[in-house]
Amino acid sequence: MSDTDLPPPSTPRPGPWDRRPEEDAPRPAQAEPARAQAEEPPLDKGQHPAWAIASTLLLGGFIWYLTGSLVMVVALLFGLFVHEYGHVLAMNRLGMGPARIYIIPFLGGLAKSQRLPQSEWHGVLVSLAGPAFGLLAAIPFYGLYLATGQGAWLQGVFVVAFLNLINLAPAPPLDGSKALGPVLARIHPMVEMGVMLAIGALVVFWGISNGSWIFAAFLAIALIGHLRRGAWRPEGRRLTWKEAGQSVVLFILTGIACAAVGFSALMPGAPNAAEALAHGVGLFEFNR
C-alpha cells in the first residue's frame, strides 16, 4: 500500500492563535515594492533657490550690522557654506544623503540628511566633518594676505577658524554636542545631560554678554528642546568603547587644528600670544 492509498486526513479547525490561510498565501510580486515605496519618506528637495538667496542676503546684512566689516561678512558666509558642505559630503558618503544645505536668516545654516545615521559612530564622523572641512575656507584669505601683505585678510582667516571652533562647543545644537554627546552617554545618559546643560548655559551667557541676543535665544531654545526631547541618542548602533576613544581623539585634533589656524592669523600683528588672543576675542565683542 502506497501513501496515495491512504484516506485523506481530516482538516483541523484553526485555533485562535493559528495563522490564517490567507496570511500564508504568497503575495503578488508587485506588492512589496509598492509597500516599500509607500513607507519610504519623500526626498527632501532642499531650500528654494529664491529663499536661499534671500536668507543669505539677510544673514550677510545682519553680520554687516554687527561688525561693519566686509571681510567678516564674506568670511563668515563663505566659511558657513564650506562648513556645511563638509557635513553634506560625510552624509552622502555614509548613506544618509542626498543631503541639503539650508540657510537660516540671522542665524547661520545647517545640513539636513535624508536618513538617520546607521550608528552613533557615523553621527560623530558627520558632526566633525563640518569643522574639519570648514577650515579649507581659510585658504583663499590666507592666500590674499600673502599676495597683498594686507593684514585685513588675516581677519578672514581668524573668522573662519573661530566659526569652526565655536561649533565644537558641546552645546545643542552645535556640532560638539553631536560629537561628544554619544561618548558621554556611553558613560551614563545623565552625564551627557549634565554636561550639555552646563556648557549650553555658558554658551548662552557668552552670546548675551557679547550682545548677540538672537544667537543666544536660538541656543537657549535649542537647549530647552534638547532637554525635553527624552531620547538622547539618534537611532542606530551605540558607540563601542573603542569608537568612543576615537571620537574623543578626533574631537581634540579638530579643535587643535581650528585653534592653530586662528592663532596663525593673529600672531603676525601681535607682539605675543596673549595680545593675539585678546585681539581675537575683541573681534567678537559686538556691543550692539
Image (spheres, grey):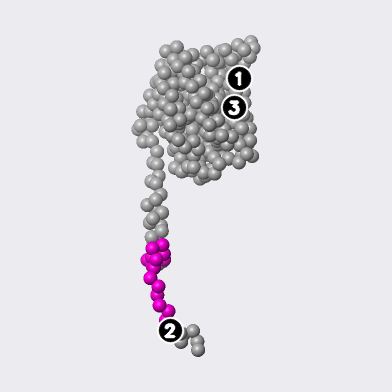
| Residue 14 on the magenta segment | yes
Badge 3, how many Cα within 10 Å: few under 14, some, many 20+? many
The magenta stretch is 8-24
Question: In the rendered structure, which amino acid carries the disc numbered 2?
Answer: Pro
Q: Which mark is residue 263?
A: 1
Quadrant in the picture for the C terminus: top left
- Looking at the picture, how far across and down is residue 136, in whole percent? 56, 30
Question: In the rendered structure, which amino acid carries the disc numbered 3?
Answer: Gly
Query: Which label sits in the foreground, 1 or 3?
Result: 3
| Residue 173 on the magenta segment | no
Q: For the stretch drawn in magenta, what is the main secondary structure?
A: loop
Q: Is residue 78 above or below residue 46?
A: above
For marks 2 and 3, give the CA distance.
81 Å
Instruction: Please name the residue that numbered disc 3 is placed on.
Output: 255
Instruction: Please name the residue that numbered disc 2 is placed on.
Output: 7
Q: Nearer the viewer, residue 232 or 13?
A: 13
Q: Secondary structure at mark 3?
A: helix
